[in-house]
Image (tube, rainbow, N blue to C red):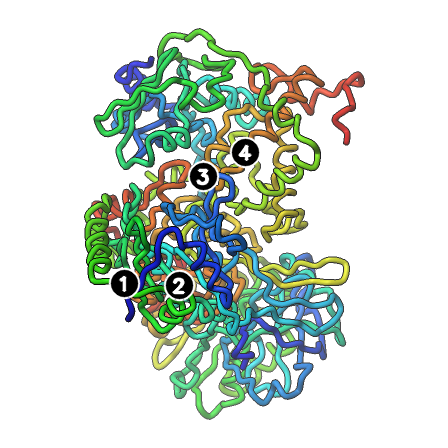
């Protein structure tokens, strides 16, 4: 856990591996890091859904989900899209460089509560990052969960993250994977269309199931509507929210949706909670 | 003086027009010596509108800072006009905004109000203390009569009007589609005595003065936001990439902010004094602007906000321009 | 605890005797009063309504270093204040002390904030009761009052010739001892109590807050906010001058070699406060920002911490350049008809 006497102090982490997931102006780069001080691992513990402030001294920090499952031991992963000041500075970093991590922050998916259930993940673009630890946690604890359905789409096939793992999902027993791209492209063997439509095409059963979705706000909105159409109850639908954040510990104020702080009370929420908070969909 | 009934009638008439979507004027505040700016959209709200010597705010400030949500796909943007009530000083802001093409002449309906001066809340509170009463005030060429909860107080103009009113050169609107009330005769001139007075200070004393003043600044940006000429969608001090000014408050960053704003207003400040009026920590911001105003007037023979047809000062370069302003 | 007093003309002596404390008291900076460290007791005046900038800046400075570092190095040096250094806020108004006790909830929940808390722990609060509430004060409506003891270690009453001092905590007793105050008599206590009662009657404005926290969320999409937000300038006056507003930004500031991570007051009234890097802003106009400011104080904060985040000091009303009056908003919110807001 973080330095309890001062939650603003970051850990220094070493970048063991840095690689691009996707190309372009808004490239996504995945960093595999480990703590410079090995002793941090003795107290560190995170769960799927937890976030961390990742930063670079001299520039600043921003909130990212930890995209590795705790079952992947000995390192943390962050998949970061190049967007603003901090992410641009992070993208400059390579294997061997250091960055800062403050965490784990926020709540997590109730993985224990979901034991025995089928898990459906519905992701769009970089929204797959918080779903990745859920997927890998279920895969690592195969006997505790039912079917795993991975539904994932992006603008083009180049924009799909974690491509090295997607193939594994398709062949693994108990796991299925359904992919889509927004617009037609040559040699694409899978669905063409937006993720909410892909979801309807796959049409997962709500019975004894949990659906977890993450992606752009507009996608989350339509996926939620479609999950409800498929018969999922609000308490079977989970998502993670994203707002601008600074402190990550429920103090600086800016990430509130209604009375909830996304950094502290979230980022994981059930639709049962969010349906009462109109600002969550703003 | 303006007949309030006529003003409300004109407002009603304007708001009923199909091509007008909102009107900016004044209404009685919930307390005290200042009327509140009022933005009304429906003819039924016209009865709230007033004009008297408590109407200090500049309604032109609200034209260009309106934030519009993106127009939904398929929908037409609302291109109806905005009506605005202006005193003489306020009208200079409309003129300058037009000069800078912040909007087009046909985008606004200007209801002009000849004005004999408005009350300075600070001066009033020094004389009478803060009041919960909704004060109204009548002004003539000699006196100001304040009705403070039924208690009528009469004060000499010089003791209670805003400084800008005591040196007002434009009591009548310089642009208007309708004039509410008769034009008034100009009563003063501006000899920039305040700037002279300030310039008597030694450089050391000036430095000390601004050091003290800018140290107080809490960077609430009310001076910027109320300024009718500060209507940039993204202000340079709020920019993060690149970040020109730090957010931390200290004498260095605060000074950068104020000096930067003064320079950005060179040849543009129309001296409505709103920046100084709203400052919660009483920074005499107008001293900087007034100095700039005089320099611009003397060196470039330019006065902003008086001629709709004029070019913006910085757009009319002349090889003969003096260069003394280059430090 | 104890009842004490000191003569009016002994104010400077009392302040001088508080050598073991770093004392902050209201002092004039031009026409504006602000809490400043006392260097010359002669400059301290207790004849004031209230400071424009609230003493929240003494617990939560507008700009504060979190830690320092050298560029290129991975060593950081935290700048946490030292709680063992005794500080005193002398002459703080009851509303502003009440504000600290409200903000304590925020800085103490879950992750404790050492910067705020160390300052709080080390500080003694000596209040000054209000004999003449200001025109826009409404402290009794939100659990305070002109002579409220909430959050204070001692409370002083200006009785004309002398200040009557009621010590309320151990820290208050320590202050009385350090200042060498003489014991007060029954008559003084009675005069103080009478002044408190009279002042309470003089508070002119009020709001019945019952039902507001529950009602505000139902007004999420309501057009009534526009009556106020249409003239809002989007400046930071209401929030920066609010003793309970606590939001901040964090920024790294680097020189050629030395750098720091610092936090500074921020406000939900600025558009960039909630602006995503993508350009999306969940609160795109002043309507949403005005709604957030009021709802945060009167609904979200009480939902979380069971107390309204407003002490009725009236600063946001007094200093708003466009007369956006929180009592007017709350009043109109009570009249507005609730509407079901749309979610997904």
Residue position for label 1: C184
The answer to whether mark 4 and mark 1 are in CB contact below 8 A is no
Label 4 marks a residue whose chain is B
Same chain for mark 4 and mark 1? The answer is: no
Instruction: Write the residue at 71% across / 73% down.
Output: C74
Image-based side of B274 in relation to B124, left or right:
right
**Position in image of residue A173 (x %, y %):** 52, 87
Q: Nearer the viewer, residue C173 or C81?
A: C173
Quadrant in the picture for residue B124: top left
The image shows residue B119, relative to residue A220, as above or below, that is: above
Residue C126 visible? The answer is yes
Chain letter of the residue carrying label 1: C
The reply to whether residue B40 is visible in this rendering is no
* Disc 1/disc 3 C-alpha distance (Å): 50 Å
Q: Position of residue B41 (x, y in %)?
A: 33, 30
Q: Which mark is residue C125?
A: 2
Q: Which residue is depicted at the point 77% across and 58% down? A: C256
- Reading the chain from its start, which is encountered first: label 1 or label 2? 2
Q: Which mark is residue B284?
A: 4
- Mark 1 surroundings: few (<14), some (14-19) or many (≥20) residues within 10 A: some
**Mark 1 against mark 3, which lies toward the viewer?**
1
Which residue: 30% across, 48% down? Answer: C160
- Do callouts 3 and 2 point to residues on the same chain? yes
Badge 4 marks a residue whose secondary structure is loop
Please tell me which of labels 3 and 2 falls first in the chain. Answer: 2
Marks 4/3: CA distance?
A: 20 Å
Q: Are marks 4 and 3 on the same chain?
A: no
Looking at the rendered image, the disc whose residue lies closer to the viewer, 1 or 2, is 1
How far, Cα to Cα, is label 3 from label 2?
Answer: 35 Å
Q: Picture coordinates of residue C146 (x, y %)?
A: 27, 53
Q: Quadrant of the C terminus of chain A?
A: bottom left
- Residue where numbered disc 3 is placed: C233
């Amino acid at each position: 856990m973080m330095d309890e006497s001062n939650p603003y102090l970051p850990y220094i982490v070493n970048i063991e591996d840095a690689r691009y997931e996707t190309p372009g102006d808004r490239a996504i780069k995945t960093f595999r890091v480990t703590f410079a001080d090995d002793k941090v691992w003795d107290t560190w513990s995170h769960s799927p859904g937890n976030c961390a402030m990742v930063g670079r001294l001299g520039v600043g920090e921003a909130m990212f989900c930890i995209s590795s499952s705790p079952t992947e031991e000995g390192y943390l992963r962050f998949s970061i899209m190049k967007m603003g000041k901090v992410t641009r500075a992070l993208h400059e970093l390579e294997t061997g460089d250091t960055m800062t991590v403050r965490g784990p922050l926020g709540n997590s998916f109730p993985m224990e509560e979901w034991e025995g259930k089928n898990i459906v993940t519905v992701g769009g673009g970089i929204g797959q990052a918080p779903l990745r630890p859920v997927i890998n946690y279920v895969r690592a604890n195969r006997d505790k969960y039912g079917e795993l359905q991975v539904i994932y789409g992006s603008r083009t096939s180049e924009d799909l993250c974690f491509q090295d793992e997607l193939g594994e999902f398709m062949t693994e027993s108990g796991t299925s994977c359904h992919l889509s791209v927004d617009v037609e492209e040559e040699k694409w063997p899978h669905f063409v269309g937006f993720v909410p439509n892909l979801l309807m095409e796959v049409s997962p059963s709500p019975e004894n199931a949990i659906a977890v979705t993450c992606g752009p706000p507009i996608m989350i909105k339509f996926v939620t509507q479609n999950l409800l159409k498929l018969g999922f109850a609000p308490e079977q639908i989970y998502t993670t929210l994203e707002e601008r954040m600074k402190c990550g510990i429920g103090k600086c104020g800016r990430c509130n949706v209604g009375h909830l702080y996304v950094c502290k009370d979230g980022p994981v929420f059930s639709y049962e909670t969010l349906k009462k908070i109109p600002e969550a969909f703003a | 003086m303006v007949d309030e009934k006529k003003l409300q009638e004109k407002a009603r008439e304007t708001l009923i027009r199909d091509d007008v979507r909102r009107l900016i004027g004044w209404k009685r505040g919930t307390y005290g010596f200042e009327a509140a700016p009022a933005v009304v959209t429906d003819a039924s709200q016209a009865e709230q509108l007033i004009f008297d010597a408590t109407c200090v705010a500049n309604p032109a400030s609200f034209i260009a800072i309106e934030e519009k949500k993106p127009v939904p796909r398929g929908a037409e943007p609302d291109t109806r006009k905005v009506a605005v009530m202006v005193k003489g000083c306020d009208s200079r802001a409309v003129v300058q905004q037009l000069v800078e093409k912040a909007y087009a002449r046909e985008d606004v309906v200007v209801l002009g109000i000849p004005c004999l001066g408005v009350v300075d809340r600070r001066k009033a509170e020094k004389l009478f203390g803060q009041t919960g009463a909704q004060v109204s005030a009548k002004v003539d060429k000699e006196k100001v009569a304040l009705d403070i909860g039924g208690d009528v107080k009469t004060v000499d103009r010089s003791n209670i009007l805003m400084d800008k009113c005591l040196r007002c050169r434009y009591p009548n609107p310089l642009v208007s589609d309708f004039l509410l009330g008769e034009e008034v005769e100009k009563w003063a001139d501006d000899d920039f005595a305040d700037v002279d007075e300030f310039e008597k200070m030694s450089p050391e004393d000036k430095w000390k003065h601004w050091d003290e003043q800018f140290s107080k600044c809490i960077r609430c940006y009310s001076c910027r936001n109320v300024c009718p000429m500060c209507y940039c969608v993204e202000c340079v001090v709020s920019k993060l990439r690149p970040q020109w000014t730090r957010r931390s408050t200290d004498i260095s960053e605060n000074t950068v902010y104020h000096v930067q704003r003064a320079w950005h207003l060179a040849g543009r400040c129309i001296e409505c004094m709103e920046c100084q009026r709203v400052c919660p920590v009483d920074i005499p911001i107008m001293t900087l602007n007034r100095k700039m105003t005089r320099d611009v007037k003397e060196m470039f023979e330019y006065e902003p906000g008086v001629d709709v047809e004029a070019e913006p000062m910085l757009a009319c370069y002349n090889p003969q321009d003096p260069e003394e302003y280059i430090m | 605890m104890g009842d004490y007093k000191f003569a009016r003309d002994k104010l400077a002596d009392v302040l001088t005797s508080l050598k073991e404390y770093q004392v902050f008291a209201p002092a004039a900076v031009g026409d504006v009063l602000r809490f400043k460290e006392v260097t010359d007791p002669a400059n301290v005046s207790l004849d004031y309504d209230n400071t424009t900038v609230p003493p929240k800046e003494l617990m939560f400075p507008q700009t504060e270093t979190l830690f320092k570092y050298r560029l290129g190095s991975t060593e950081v040096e935290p700048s946490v204040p030292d709680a063992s250094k005794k500080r005193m806020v002398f002459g703080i108004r009851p509303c502003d002390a009440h504000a600290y006790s409200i903000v304590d909830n925020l800085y103490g929940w879950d992750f404790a904030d050492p910067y705020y808390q160390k300052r709080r722990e080390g500080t003694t609060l000596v209040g000054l009761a209000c004999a003449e509430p200001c025109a826009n004060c409404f402290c009794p409506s939100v659990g305070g009052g002109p002579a409220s003891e909430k959050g204070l270690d001692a409370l002083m009453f200006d009785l004309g010739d002398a200040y009557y001092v009621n010590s309320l905590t151990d820290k208050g007793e320590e202050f009385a001892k350090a200042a060498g105050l003489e014991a007060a008599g029954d008559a003084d206590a009675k005069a103080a109590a009478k002044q408190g009662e009279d002042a309470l009657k003089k508070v002119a404005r009020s709001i019945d807050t019952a039902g507001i926290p529950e009602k505000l969320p139902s007004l999420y999409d309501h057009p009534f906010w526009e009556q106020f937000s249409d003239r809002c300038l989007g400046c930071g006056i209401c929030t920066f001058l609010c003793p309970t507003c606590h939001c901040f930004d964090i920024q790294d500031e680097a020189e050629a070699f030395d750098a720091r991570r610092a936090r500074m007051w921020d406000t939900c009234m600025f558009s960039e406060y909630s602006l995503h890097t993508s350009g999306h802003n969940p609160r795109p106009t002043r309507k949403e920002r005005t709604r957030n400011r009021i709802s945060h104080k009167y609904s979200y904060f009480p939902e979380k911490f069971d107390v309204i985040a407003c002490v009725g000091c009236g600063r946001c009303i007094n200093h708003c350049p466009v007369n956006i009056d929180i009592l007017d908003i709350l009043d109109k919110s009570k009249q507005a008809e609730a509407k079901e807001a749309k979610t997904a």
